[in-house]
Image: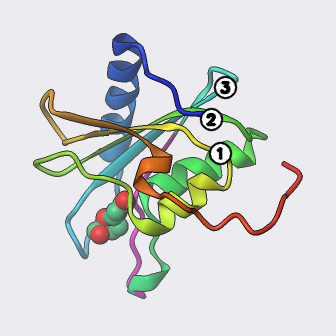
Amino acid sequence: MSHTPDAAVADRLVEKARTARRNAYCPYSRFAVGAALLAESGRIYTGANCENAAFGAGICAERAALSAAVTAGERRFLLLAVAAGDKPVTPCGICRQMLAEFGDLTVICAAAEGDQRLVTPLSSLLPHAFTAFSPER
Ligand code: THU
């Protein structure tokens, strides 16, 4: 279930995404992205995009953060912050689908700097996500 974030929590998460963004490895696109994912446990997991000379092998910041969280045993999430670019960017389609595996959450999209935000439920970014199976999480 998606929820409305407290402003201070949202700001803290965006700050973490911006910090992660500094470690983005993006020599090909030069487009650095950072993500921070708040789990129900209260822990925050971060990710940055990591590109590769074989372009398709790269990974987005959001999936990097999700993989770190899942590896730590997390399965339930409240909030995701994404930080990149001159204007707030939304997660790509593959990241939306990966996140939807674990249910709905609130996505806070921010630019690399500044106060502009787009706050939306994941389910609005990806209505009718593919959920053909009922996995045990
Ligand atoms: N990228 C992300 O990290 N997240 C997104 O949601 C969209 C795109 C990365 C992939 C690639 O390294 C760079 O941004 C340019 O597409």
Q: Label 3 amino acid?
A: Glu
Mark carried by residue 40: 3
Q: In this view, does 90 lie above or below 15?
A: below
Return the residue found at the far right. Answer: 136
- Label 1 Cα crowd, 10 Å radius (few <14 / some 14-19 / many 20+): some
Task: Report the number of numbered marks.
Answer: 3
Which residue corresponds to the image point at 78% horizontal and 40% vertical from the top-left? 73
Magenta stretch secondary structure, dominant: loop
For residue 103, which numbered disc appears in the image? Answer: 1
Residue at image position (70%, 63%) is: 131
- Res 77 label: 2
Q: Which amino acid does label 2 sit on?
A: Phe
**Which percent across, then down, holds residue 1?**
61, 33
Q: How far apart are marks 1 and 2 (CA)?
A: 8 Å
- Splitting the image into four quadrants, where does ligand 1 fall? bottom left
Q: Give the range drawn in magenta.
A: 46-54
Identify the secondary structure beneath mark 2.
strand
Residue farthest to the front, as pictured: 128
Q: What residue type is labelled 1?
A: Gly
Q: Which is nearer the eye, 3 or 28? A: 3
In contact (CB < 8 Å): disc 1 and disc 2 = yes
Quadrant for residue 39, please give it.
top right
Q: Is residue 25 visible?
A: no
